[in-house]
Amino acid sequence: MTLNIKQGIYLAALLHDIGKFWQRGSKYDETLSVQTKNMESDLCPVWNSRYSHKHVLWTSEFFEQYTKYIPQSFNRDGELESIANLSAKHHKKASGQTEWERIISYADRLSSGQDRRPDEIGVDTSGSQQRYDFKKIPLQNIFDNLFKVEESNKQSWHILSPLTTNDDIFAKKSDKLSRDLQPDYENLWKSFTDELPNLPLHNFSQYVSTLLPLLEKYCWCIPSSTIDQPDVSLFDHLKTTAAIATSLYDSIETHGSLPSTYDGMKNENKDRFILLSADFSGIQKFIYQITSKGAAKTLKGRSFYLQLIMDMMITHILEVFDVEKAHILLAGGGGFRLLLPNNETKIKEIENFIDDVNKQIWDLYDGKLYVALATLPFKPSILLRNDGYTELVDEIQSKLEKEKYRRFARTIDAIFFEPPPLKGVTASDVCKVTGTDLTEDQKSTKKFDNNEEGTISKSVAEQIELGKQLRNARVMIKWRGRNAKRDIEFSPLDQNITYSFVTDEEIQEGLLSRLIRQPQISEIIWFNKPESFMKVSSPDSSYSSGFMFYGSNWTPGTVYNDESKTYIPIQDRVPDFEEIADDRGRNNDLGILRMDVDNLGNTFKNGFISGKAENNASISRISTLSNRITWFFGGYLDHLIRSDFTIPQKFNAASDQLGNETVLNEELRAHILPIYAGGDDLFIVTRWDIAPFLAKRIHDDLQKFSNGKLTVSAGIAVTSNKYPIHKAANEAGDAESKAKNLDPILEDLKPQKDAICYFGMPLSWTDFDNSAQLMDKMIDWQKDMGNRSLTGFLRKTTGEFEKDKRKKYGRWRWRAAYQLKRMISRKDKIIGEELAQFGSWLFTGSFNGNDFKRTENNELIDVVPFLTRWIQNLTHNS
C-alpha cells in the first residue's frame, strides 16, 4: 500500500511516539538493530552534550521490524519517501527538517500544548531523573490534577493492561512508585504486536480506522510523557497529533507554506484550523414525547436513532474534508466536536448539508429536533497557551447555544414558504405513539402487544424495530448504500449509509463470519468489546474494525412469571414497563432515574488551570479527560448493570415472595432498562425500589473512578407503570433539578449539588446513606414488633411536623415523645430499648452520631416524612 503525502503525514503522526511504548518494554537497547543505532545522530537531538529523546530510535525500528504490517512510504512527486524518517525525526531542530518533517514536529508540540522539556531519554540529564526511571512511572489518573489537589488524597495510577469495560480502568491509589514496569510493558507490547498482522492492508482509510482503536486498546494506559505530570495517555497524544498534522498539511493549500522555524509558527497570525461542533437541540422532546403505546420498545430505539444520525453526519463531514477518525475530538451526549483544516469552501458545503438534514428533520418530527452547527477558526499558536484550547471550547459552545436560539433560521424559507405536504385529519392519520399528524407517505401500521392495530409513522416503526434489534446486539455493521445483505436495516434520513446488527447468538452460529465477506460492508463496530474487535479483521478485509462504548446496551432478557414464581426468558422483544416494574404485587411502580455530572463544563474549562498556572489544559489532556468520562458512562456502566450490582435484601420489595437470602444480580437486571447512558448523563427506567441504590452505586463508583473529583446528582420519579413516560421523564428531570439546587450548609454558598432526590426529598448522598442505614434498623424493628405501630407513629409525627411548618422545636416534639413513651411501655424490654434508642436519635437530631447536614433543620426530623413514605412503600401488602 503506497500512500500519498497527506496519508503519509497522518500515519507518521499517528505513530510518531510509538517508540515510547516499545522502549519502555525493552531491556535497554538490545532490540535495536545496528542500522538503527547508527542513526542516532540523524534522529536524536542533543541535550547537555548527549543524545536525548531516544524513543525515536524505537519508532524507526518499529517501521523496520514490522514492515509487513505498516506502510513504509508515500509518493511525493513520483518519488517514494520514507514514513519512518518522517515519523522519527520530529525532535530534530526545524532547520534540519524537511517541510513534511516539520509538520509532525509542530503537531507534536501543539498536541502537548507547551514547549517540551527533555522527554524519556534513558540517561540522567539534570540530576532529577535517574537512569531508566521512565520505566517505573505509570499513567497518573487524569482526575488527580483537577482543581486543588488535597494533600489527604493519595495519587492514583493506572495499571498496564488492555482496555476493558470492568473496573480495571479504575486507577489504583498509591503513596509512591518504585516498581520496574518493564515486564508489564513487554507483555503489553507483545499483545499489541500480535494483533498487527490482522490490520486490513488494501485501503488506507480502513487500515488507519482499525489501527486507531488498536492503539486505544493498548496505549490508553501509557503516559505520553513521564516528566512532571504524567496524566496524558499516549493514545490521546498520538490521536490529536495526527489530527493536527493533517490539518496543518491541508492548510498549506489555503493559507500558504508553514513557517520554517518553531518560533515563526508560534508567532504566525493565520487561522489554519477550525473547531466544528454540532449539537442536537430538543433531544428530550424528541425521545420522550410518546404515548404509552409501545413506549418501552420505542424509547431505546428512539434514543439510539439519534446516535445513528450523529454517526452519519460525522461520516459525511470527514469525507468532505478527506480526513480520518482521529479528527473526532468528542462524540457523545447528543453532539460532536471535530478539529479540521480551515477551508471556507468545505465549511459552506457542510453548512448546506446540515441545512438539508434539518429540513428532513422538520418534515419528520415537526420541529421537535434540530441540529445546531458552529465553526470557530483559530491560529495554531492558541493550542500552546495554557488555557488556549479550553477558551476555544468555551467560545464554540457559546456559539452553539446562540445557534439553538435561531433554530431553523437558515432553512426558514424552505420550511415556511414552500407548500407543506398534505397531512391527514382523521384519527387514522395520527401516529399512536407520538401523536403526530402524518401524510400518506409517512404512515405505517403496527400491531401492539394487545393485538390492537394502529397507525404509526414509518420513522417510529423503524425506531421500534431498532429497539428490538438492540436487545441482544453485540456488533453493529455499517454498510455502503442501501444494499445491505440483512433482512432488517436502518438508514437514518436516507443518507446512503445503512446500519444493521448482529447478536451474540448469531456470532456463535457463524453469521458474522458469513456477512463480512460482503464487499458492501465499510465497518464492523463492537459494542463494549475492545478485547474482541480485532477477531474479524484480517489483511484481506475490505472493511475497518472498531468498538464503541454504548452505556445502554443492556436490555433484560428475562421477566418474572407469576405462575412459575421464577424468571423466564423472553425472545425478540423488549420487556414492557409493567414487567420492569413488577415487584410481585406490592406497588408495581417504576423508578425513572436521571443523573448527570455536576459542573462538568467548569471542570473542562478551569479544572487544569484554576489557581495552578503551571498545569496546562492541552488538547491532548482534555482529550484524555473526555475519554475517561466516556468510558465510565458508556462502558463501565454497562458492565455494572450486567455483572456487578446488588442491593440490600431488606430494601428489595419482592424479597419475601422470592425467599432469597441475597438479592441476585440476575433478578435485578430483569428490572433495569437503560434508555440512554453516554456523555456525562443517563436515563434509566427501573423498578422503584432498585432506583436509589443503582443511583448510589453509580455515584460511589464515579467518586472512586475520579479520585473524588467528580460528583453527580440524581433525580428519581416514582410513578405508576402506566403513567405517560414523557411526564415521568419531566418529573425525574424536576427531581434532578431539586437535587442540584439543594440548599448548601452555609447560606452564603451556592448550591453544592452532589445530591439525590427520591420521593420528592432532596438529600446529600451522605444524608441518603444515613437514611438508608436508619431504615435498615426500622424494618427490623417493625418486623420484630409484628405490627405497623412504628409506621403509624412515623405518620403521625410527620403530620405534626408539617402542621408546625417544619419547625425544629414545634409541638411535634413533645407529642412524639409522649407517643413513643406509650409504645415503649407496651413492648418487651429488648424492643423497648431499641425504640428508646430511636427516640434518642430523633430528639438529639442525629443518627449514631451522624448529623443530617444539608436538610432544612440539619436534623433527623427533616427526613422523617421521607422515611415514612419509603417504609410504607416497602411494607405495602406485606
Image (tube, helix red, strand yellow):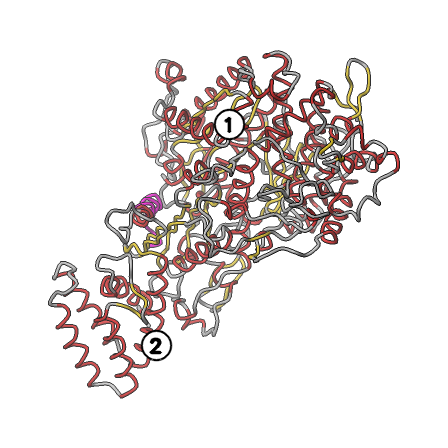
Q: Is residue 457 above or below residue 778?
A: above
Kind of residue at badge 2: Asp
Which element carries disc 1, helix, strand or loop? helix
Between 299 and 314, the one lying in front of the other is 314
Q: Earlier in the sequence, mark 1 or mark 2?
A: 1
Residue 64: horizontal and vertical position, in percent? Answer: 83, 34
Q: Is residue 176 above or below residue 773?
A: above
Membership of 729 in magenta stretch: yes
In the image as oriented, which residue stretches furthest toward the right? Answer: 34
Q: Which mark is residue 843?
A: none
Residue to which mark 1 is pinned: 493
Tag count in the figure? 2
Residue occupying image coordinates x 28% and y 51%: 744
Instruction: Specify start and end residues of the magenta stretch as a single range.
Output: 720-734
Residue 706: horizontal and vertical position, in percent? Answer: 49, 50
Q: Is residue 187 above or below residue 524?
A: below
Badge 2 crowding class, 10 Å Cα cut-off, few under 14, some 14 to 19, many 20 or more, is few
Badge 1 crowding class, 10 Å Cα cut-off, few under 14, some 14 to 19, many 20 or more, is some
Please identify the quadrant where the N terminus is shown.
top right
Q: Is residue 657 left or right of residue 570?
A: left
Residue 230: horizontal and vertical position, in percent? Answer: 60, 44
Residue to which mark 2 is pinned: 780
Mark whose residue sits in front, 1 or 2: 2
- Label the magenta part by its dominant secondary structure: helix
Membership of 322 in magenta stretch: no
Residue 33: horizontal and vertical position, in percent? Answer: 87, 38
Kind of residue at badge 1: Leu
Quarter of the figure with residue 126: top right
Which element carries disc 2, helix, strand or loop? helix
Instruction: Give how far apart the Cα atoms at labels 1 and 2 are.
Output: 57 Å
